[in-house]
Image (tube, rainbow, N blue to C red):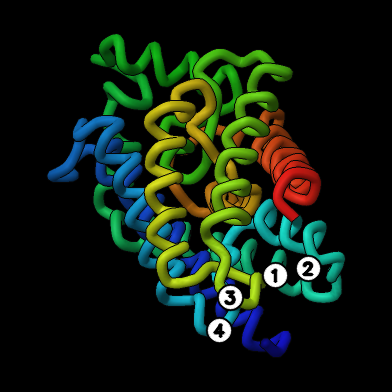
Amino acid sequence: MSSSDIFIGETIGTAILILLGGGVCAAVTLKASKARNAGWLAITFGWGFAVLTAVYTSAPLSGAHLNPAVTLAIAIKDGDWKNVPVYWAGQVLGAMIGAALVWIAYYGQFHAHLTDREIVGGPGAQDTAAKAVEAQEKGAGPVLGVFSTGPEVRVAWQNVATEIIGTVVLVLAVLTQGLNDKGNGLGTLGALVTALVVVSIGLSLGGPTGYAINPARDLGPRIVHALLPLPNKGGSDWGYAWVPVVGPLIGGAIAAGIYNVAFA
């Protein structure tokens, strides 16, 4: 695979991943969405299908890492680091593009949600306004969850540990079951396995932090949230932003170490 193929494949694949994954979060969260309040099952299966679609689309070009933690783990496994920066650049750019596309697709819903008094506060606000204000005081605006993750209980060591554990499960599944014959990316059957593992992680381990398990998935959309002209959008919670970057990278490295000791 050439550097240009890797960059284009990772950009397209990660854009699709975030468009569909962030899209289900928007569908469940925003006012005037037909899927509002569809719940956690919709989100977890939406992200699983997002992974499946993104992998099948981008695998022929780049091997469909779509996740800096996966790229790091494969580099540790193989000892080949030359394309790591290209993968990471494509993944972050793709995540930003995907987040921007979610904003376009749900433009009217974002406006309706963020101008509603019950959501953002003001005269006539109800309990939901108090919850939104409380969230903003912690650094997270009322629609940040459409773009990036955040903890239900803000305990840094636990939040990092949760992301590490979830990422170890994901990356071990990729390394042991998901890679193609060349070992440099996901194969056809591996895409399905990985998508199902993502659903499982969401259902079982997603409750505490929203299961980023992917630094690009969180960082790229968080940057877009900070840049978009959304009314009353609140903060982007940069004080927490390191957790879904550092945790998954540590998890990916641990998974690669386990693989090299136990499976290689």
- In this rendering, the answer to whether 19 lies above or below 148 is below
167 relative to 88 in the view: left or right: left
- Amino acid type at mark 4: Leu
Residue 61 numbered tag: 4
Image point 70% across, 89% down: which residue?
2
- Amino acid type at mark 1: Tyr
Q: Earlier in the sequence, mark 2 or mark 4?
A: 4
Which quadrant of the figure contains the C terminus?
A: bottom right
Q: Nearer the viewer, residue 19 or 110?
A: 19
The percent coordinates of residue 129 (x first, y second) are 35, 17
- Amino acid type at mark 2: Val
Q: Residues within 10 Å of mark 2 (few under 14, many from 20)?
A: some
Q: Nearer the viewer, residue 46 or 138?
A: 46
The percent coordinates of residue 168 (x first, y second) are 64, 39
The percent coordinates of residue 133 (x first, y second) are 46, 17
Q: Is residue 30 visible?
A: no
Q: Which residue is mark 3?
A: 181
Q: Residues within 10 Å of mark 4 (few under 14, many from 20)?
A: many
- In this rendering, the answer to whether 125 lies above or below 92 is above
Rendering quarter of residue 153: top right
Q: Which residue is mark 2?
A: 84
Instruction: Classify mark 3: helix, strand or loop.
Output: loop
Q: Which residue is mark 1?
A: 87
Instruction: Classify mark 4: helix, strand or loop.
Output: helix
